Amino acid sequence: MSSPARFDRGHTDDLMTFLAASPSPYHAVANSAERLEKAGFRQVAETDAWDSTAGGKFVLRGGAIIAWYVPEDAAAHTPFRIIGAHTDSPNLRVKPQPDTGSQGWRQIAVEIYGGTLLNTWLDRDLGLAGRLTLRDGSDRLVNVDRALLRVPQLAVHLDRSVNSDGLKLDKQRHMQPIWGLGEVREGDLIAFLEEEEGLPQGSVAGWDLMVHSIEPPAYLGRDRELLAGPRMDNLLSVHAGVAALAAVSTAGKLPYIPVLAAFDHEENGSQSDTGADGPLLGNVLERSVFARGGSYEDRARAFAGTVCLSSDTGHAVHPNYGERHDPTHHPRANGGPILKVNVNQRYATDGSGRAVFAAACERAGVPWQSFVSNNSMPCGTTIGPITAARHGIQTVDIGVAILSMHSARELCGAEDPYLLANALVAFLEG
């Protein structure tokens, strides 16, 4: 076995920078692309003809990025090693007619995206970020990273039973953030963003906007052994995947073609042109085979030898709710990445996949843990089963154990992102 991976806090510091700079899937994709370009990758357009040259390439589509590295002299039937992840996180997203209000308060109309913990958005200072589409068809990223919005909770004096009976929130009535006082004026929010971005009035034709907590990521605890921050589900895996792909692109001869596939819309089912249940990944892999002179037979051979690690966060054992976990599987923070198993195919892992993951961790000197849900609790799912079924490739579900999943602010062990990245490098290198 390799010597144990020694924790490098620099990786976690860099993750914190990535999280803070990526308040939306569009920002996460742009930041990933920038990092890959610095590592020598180049963007290719889906509308262009692709060539057979070696090296790093990536495709961008909305909130998704597919990146891959073709080694010198790679055969057309060379299998792929894929890291799968997703760029989206549960949050509050702006509606098509955003300007609203009541009782003299100006508010922003939002829709609930994904399975967010609603109460974690209350009484936080919130910013606004996302994508503006201009009338000429171009896109502009926007990030108002200051205290702009707030979802105010009802005072305990007006809800005396809240601490005994629990907080009950209506998604429509109770989650609309305030951003000022006065009369509601249609078009105010977009006019404000046009001014923020220095755009001519009326130049914005469409938008994909969402709120985010402006509190930055931070180390937590006496010994700074924990990390608190937003959107770890699942930008933690995106960041590790980008780092791993950039690292192996300098490794020399590789037996596989390493790939990073970071999709949008995982939190609401993956059924979109940028989601894992869409054709994007399959199209990119097939075009890579055909660009190198391959046939359908080569494509079939390449897919048959391909393995995907679907990397997403999982549940660390909770100190206050230990009974909610399986009694013999208690993943712990800083215990290394987790192998996620569900025999009903909510996760795609099987025994063969377990062997692949265990071998990668052993080569990297990384400890790892197993996760399985309590039989009495319904199990979540990932892009893993979708990827396996849609493309017919072996897929293994893994990730990092966290607390407060789907909160506006989540918590993990400070060492685990680094350990995950090391395991991903070993997996891509084969």
Image: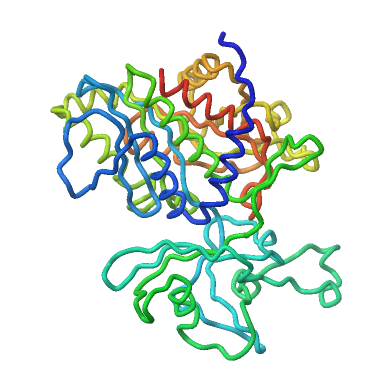
State the residue lying farthest toward the top.
1
**Relative to residue 207, is residue 165 drawn left or right?**
right
Does residue 73 lie above or below 276 as drawn?
A: above
The residue sitting at 35% across, 29% down in the picture is 393
The residue sitting at 42% across, 41% down in the picture is 35
Of the 4 image quadrants, the one containing the N terminus is top right
- Percent across and percent down for residue 310 are 46, 34
Does residue 167 lie above or below 405 as drawn?
A: below
- Percent across and percent down for residue 190 are 45, 77
Q: Foreground: 348 or 301?
A: 301
Q: Foreground: 387 or 73?
A: 73
Of the 4 image quadrants, the one containing the C terminus is top left
Looking at the rendering, which quadrant does residue 315 occupy? Answer: top right
Does residue 23 lie above or below 2 as drawn?
A: below
**Relative to residue 128, is residue 392 drawn left or right?**
left
- Percent across and percent down for residue 233 are 56, 45
